[in-house]
Amino acid sequence: MSDTIRVTKRFTFDMAHALYGYDGPCKNIHGHTYHLAVTVAGVINVQEGHPELGLVVDFSELKEITRQIILSEFDHALVLKNDAPYSRDGFLPEHFEKVLLVPFQPSCENLLMHFHRLLREALPARIRLVALRLDETPTSYAEWRMEDQR
């Protein structure tokens, strides 16, 4: 039996959002520099001659998966709840390139869970997603960990 190893890759991206119906300043469109930490677990490849000998996963593979399904969509995007009045008139998507209308309030917590679903579906079977952390500001973040799930 091989030991399980956790591997983490960190990403940084900029994104704007507004929390429709929120009773505070975050109801206004504003932006953040987000930091996303993706942690996966698996066993070290011990197959002699394999190009990934000694690795759980190549960091570049984890980077490419995350870039394709999260960063390419969310970096420098404006993310709004799709049923907010300002989302329905078509003005924003018509005048700006990256407006994402999502079926949830784009809070740090909900964005994190959306990223969780996207990554879980995209990761190779040999590794499993065990933790995600999304820092919205230098002092505020949301975190998902497999060990907390029932």
Image (spheres, grey):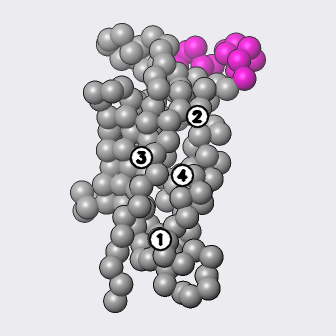
Rendered position, 7 above or below 42? above
For label 1, the crowd category at 10 Å Cα-Cα, with few meaning under 14, some 14 to 19 and many 20 or more, is: many
User: Tags 4 and 1 in contact by the CB under 8 Å rule?
Assistant: no
Q: Can I make out residue 82 in this image? A: no
Q: Which residues are magenta?
A: 83-97
Label 2 CA crowd tier, 10 Å (few <14, some 14–19, many 20+)? some
- Per the image, the residue denoted by label 1 is 56
Q: Which tag, 4 or 3, sits closer to the chain's start? A: 3
How far apart marks 2 and 3 lie (CA) works out to 15 Å
Question: Mark 4 or mark 2: which comes first in sequence?
Answer: 2
| Tag 3: amino acid | Ala
Judge left or right: residue 110 versus residue 50: left
Quadrant of residue 79 within the rendered picture = top right
Report the residue marked by disc 2: 74
- The residue to which callout 3 is attached is 37
State the CA–CA distance, disc 4 to disc 3. Answer: 14 Å
Q: Provide the residue designation for mark 4.
A: 118
Image height of 34 relative to 3, above or below: above
Q: Secondary structure at mark 2?
A: helix
Name the secondary structure under disc 3: strand
